[in-house]
């Protein structure tokens, strides 16, 4: 099963290599990994999407916790959390299909961020499902380039009843 | 007053209580060596002959004392030569702190002369490592390095020191507080879990303790003994756990696993309550996983949460320091009827174990005439030393025979590369142990193959007048390889015969040590006695043993523990 794990690490030289090395050295897989500084410049947050059975996920979280640079590990899976990805899609355009593409952009609340004579670059944000859906709809027009960030995630705050 | 980085380093070591550095100089660390030249404080430097030797020595120092061992080497090749030693210490959780020189910060990444990315190289085989980028971080990092190495589950830590950091100047202030928000080992076991564990044990009929190296690193052997005695539980240990429980105690069943005793392996296969203490269910211990302890509920006490339920799912995990958990367990054992009922209930189990011990003891027959049996040499070493020695081993048959036939009565008296299985470990480790324990008898039980992997350290032992003893069980083969080829490759002895061996007696003498040889059974005692008399130089004993001898019992890799091949 897939898991989204949020990891707080000290923002130091080599931390990313340590985490990537842990995954490759122990044969765990990484589907995506995002990392950036938090509001505290000494701390970074990594969001790692990985998969495995319960035992593997347990090992992953324990092994992460064991690293001296790791402050906190939070497996968000099974909890209520928000996750987002951003994708940039450069799609071929022609005189005839521009309107159709723009309506897709509109439906997904995406944005055209760059326009060329024969292409649009579209920015879309959302969960994985949404990104997949828009990509599928744009594919018939011809996707020239595609870049996505990988997931970032955060637990939802508990609502008071 | 401002100090240079090199001076700060040495002062920090003194402040950490370090008394010995095992090292080898080179360009990048010359500023440190220059400080050592003038230094008159309580810090000794042992000049090794190969950096791998330095790490094994520091490791032997650490395993025999419990205090971190310290290594100092230069950049590039000096640093890469330490890798096997570091990996060895990592696999066996030994606190070692390795300082490597590095090219100046401005040159890092430029393929400078003698540059190696040692922090990158050792990341997967250190508990933690550091590149010191600025002199203001140096004192803090040294402090942290020692703290991380010796606390929690101990392990090696490497600190990489660029040359410009060593020559820069700063005020030295020993940091009194460490900020390691991501490093907080759990020491105290969970109350409820401890209660549950005691309940499980008291309801069992066939309990077994399976103790590992964690008992030794946690200094918990006294507690382990009280625990086993109070609940009358038979004990087996792993290779790493030998000495953690007295080898001559009636409750001791010997080592378990691939070359474990019949009794230990049968007991683990039949137990209904396995209490794993500071052990990690290594494949050499468990054999075929699905058939390991098939009837048992398992309790697992370990300081490292990643060890728990990694290979074998356990019923009652207790994360914590083995010693503190055992103490709490001791306090939680009830007295009165509950305890006496339990003890009555396990009587049959004890009878069964006695029976196994009687029918399948570990013993060897040494014919009066004919070749020396390697096991006999170990038995005689045990007898003639009264078991009062620190034993190190190389890897292979020698290691297994040492484990089987020497009875280790005390912790920190058996030093062996269990996890990585590093040939060449035993001799430098013995030197390190001798440096740390000048008045103790230290013996490396070696193979003729392994001893040649770090034989150069003979010069170190001679230079520092260290009376380390080496007992080579010389079978003219890479014996353990030959044994596997015999059993699993239909006797195709591919490259396992050491066609040409040096004359070990002359070799020892060439280094300035003493060489002795035993060719006949009758020579064995004489050679050992003579060696024991020598107090100012290393001694190499060359025992020409039966080359056909194999290690038994043996559980073939991947088979369950009760499928032992017996003699
Ligand atoms: C550095 C290293 N290389 C290779 C091996 C594989 N290996 C394991 S045991 C062994 C044979 C050891 O021979 P020897 O030292 O003569 O000991 P014996 O088994 O004969 O007692 C070898 C080659 C190893 N453990 N370590």
Image (tube, grey):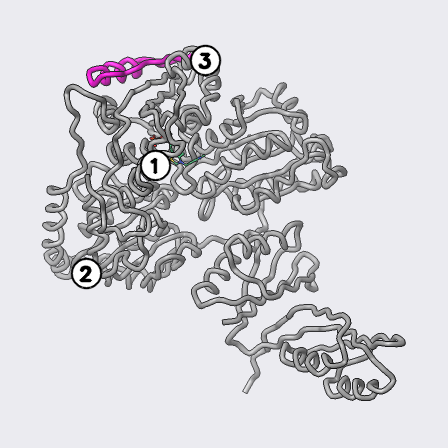
Depth check: B333 or B247 in front? B247
Q: Is label 3 on the same chain as label 1? A: yes
> Does A89 sit left or right of A96 as displayed?
left
Depth check: B356 or B297 in front? B356
> Does B478 sit left or right of A121 as displayed?
left
Image x and y of residue B471, in percent: 33, 23
Image x and y of residue B35, in percent: 64, 23
Q: Earlier in the sequence, mark 3 or mark 1?
A: 1
**Residue B277 versus residue B13 in the image, above or below:** below
Distance, label 3 to label 1, CA atoms, is: 37 Å
Q: Would you identify the image quadrant in which residue B142 lies?
A: top right
Of badges 2 and 3, the one in the foreground is 3
Of badges 1 and 2, the one in the foreground is 1
Q: Dot 2 corresponds to which residue?
A: B204
SS class of the residue under badge 1? loop
Q: Dot 1 corresponds to which residue?
A: B492
**Residue B98 versus residue A103 in the image, above or below:** above
Q: Dot 3 corresponds to which residue?
A: B511
Distance, label 1 to label 2, CA atoms, is: 48 Å
Of badges 3 and 1, the one in the foreground is 1
Boundaries of the magenta span: B513-536
Q: Earlier in the sequence, mark 2 or mark 3?
A: 2
Residue A88 image label: none
Q: Chain of mark 1?
A: B
Q: Chain of mark 3?
A: B
Total numbered badges shown on the rendered structure: 3
SS class of the residue under badge 2? loop
For the residues bearing labels 2 and 3, Cβ distance under 8 angstroms:
no
Image x and y of residue A123, in percent: 77, 76
């Amino acid at each position: 099963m897939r898991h989204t794990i949020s990891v707080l690490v000290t923002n130091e030289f080599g931390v990313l290599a340590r985490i990537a090395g842990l995954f490759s050295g122990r044969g765990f897989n990484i589907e995506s990994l995002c990392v950036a500084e938090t509001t505290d410049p000494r701390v970074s947050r990594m969001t790692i999407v990985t998969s495995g059975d319960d035992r593997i996920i347990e090992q992953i979280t324990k092994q992460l916790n064991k690293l001296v640079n790791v402050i906190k590990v939070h497996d968000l899976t099974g909890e209520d959390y928000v996750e987002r990805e951003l994708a940039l899609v450069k799609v071929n355009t022609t005189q005839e299909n521009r309107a159709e593409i723009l309506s897709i952009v509109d439906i997904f609340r995406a944005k055209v961020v760059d326009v060329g004579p024969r292409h649009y670059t579209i920015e879309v944000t959302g969960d994985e499902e949404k990104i997949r859906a828009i990509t599928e709809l744009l594919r018939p027009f011809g996707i020239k380039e595609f870049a996505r960030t990988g997931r970032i995630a955060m637990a939802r705050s508990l609502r008071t009843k | 007053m401002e100090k240079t980085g090199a001076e700060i380093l040495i002062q920090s070591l003194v402040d950490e209580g370090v008394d010995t550095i095992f090292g080898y100089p080179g360009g990048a660390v010359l500023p440190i060596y220059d400080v050592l030249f003038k230094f008159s404080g309580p810090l000794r430097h042992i000049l090794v002959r190969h950096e791998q030797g330095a790490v094994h020595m520091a490791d032997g120092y650490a395993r025999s004392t419990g205090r971190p061992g310290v290594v100092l080497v230069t950049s590039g090749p000096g640093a890469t030569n330490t890798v096997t030693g570091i990996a060895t210490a990592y696999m066996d959780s030994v606190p070692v702190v390795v300082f490597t020189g590095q090219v100046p910060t401005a040159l890092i990444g430029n393929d400078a002369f003698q540059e190696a990315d040692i922090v990158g190289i050792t990341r997967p085989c250190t508990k933690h490592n550091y590149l010191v980028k600025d002199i203001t971080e140096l004192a803090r990092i040294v402090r942290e390095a020692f703290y991380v190495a010796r606390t929690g589950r101990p392990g090696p830590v490497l600190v990489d020191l660029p040359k410009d950091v060593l020559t820069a100047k700063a005020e030295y202030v020993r940091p009194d507080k460490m900020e390691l928000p991501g490093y907080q080992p759990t020491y105290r076991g969970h109350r409820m879990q401890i209660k549950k564990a005691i309940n499980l044990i008291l309801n069992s009929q066939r309990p077994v303790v399976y103790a590992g190296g964690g008992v030794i690193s946690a200094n918990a052997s006294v507690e382990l003994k009280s625990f086993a005695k109070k609940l009358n539980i038979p004990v087996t240990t792993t290779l790493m756990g030998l000495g953690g429980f007295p080898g001559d105690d009636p409750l001791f069943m010997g080592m378990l696993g691939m070359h474990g005793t019949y009794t230990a392996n049968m007991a683990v296969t039949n137990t209904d309550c396995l209490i794993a203490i500071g052990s990690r269910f290594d494949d050499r211990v468990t054999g075929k996983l699905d058939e390991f302890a098939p009837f048992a509920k398992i309790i697992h006490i370990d300081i490292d949460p990643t060890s728990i339920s990694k290979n074998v799912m356990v019923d009652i995990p207790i994360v914590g320091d083995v010693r503190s958990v055992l103490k709490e367990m001791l306090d939680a054992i009830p007295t009165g009827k509950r305890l006496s009922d339990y003890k009555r209930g396990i009587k049959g189990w004890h009878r069964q174990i006695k029976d196994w011990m009687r029918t399948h003891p570990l013993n060897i027959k040494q014919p009066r005439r004919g070749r020396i049996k390697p096991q006999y040499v170990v038995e005689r070493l045990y007898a003639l030393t009264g078991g009062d020695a620190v034993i190190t081993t190389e890897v292979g048959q020698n290691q297994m025979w040492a484990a089987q036939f020497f009875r280790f009565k005390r912790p920190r008296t058996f030093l062996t590369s269990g996890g990585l299985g590093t040939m060449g470990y035993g001799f430098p480790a013995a030197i390190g142990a001798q440096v740390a324990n000048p008045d103790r008898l230290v013996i490396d039980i070696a193979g003729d193959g392994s001893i040649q992997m770090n034989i150069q350290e003979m010069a170190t032992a001679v230079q520092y007048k260290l009376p380390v003893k080496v007992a080579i069980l010389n079978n003219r083969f890479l014996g353990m390889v030959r044994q596997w080829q015999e059993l699993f490759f239909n006797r195709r002895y591919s490259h396992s015969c050491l066609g040409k061996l040096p004359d070990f007696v002359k070799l020892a003498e060439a280094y300035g040590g003493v060489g002795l040889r035993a060719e006949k059974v009758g020579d064995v005692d004489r050679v050992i006695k003579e060696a024991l008399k020598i107090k100012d130089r290393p001694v190499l004993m060359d025992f020409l043993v039966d080359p056909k001898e194999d290690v038994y019992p043996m559980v073939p890799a991947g088979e369950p523990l009760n499928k032992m091949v017996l003699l």
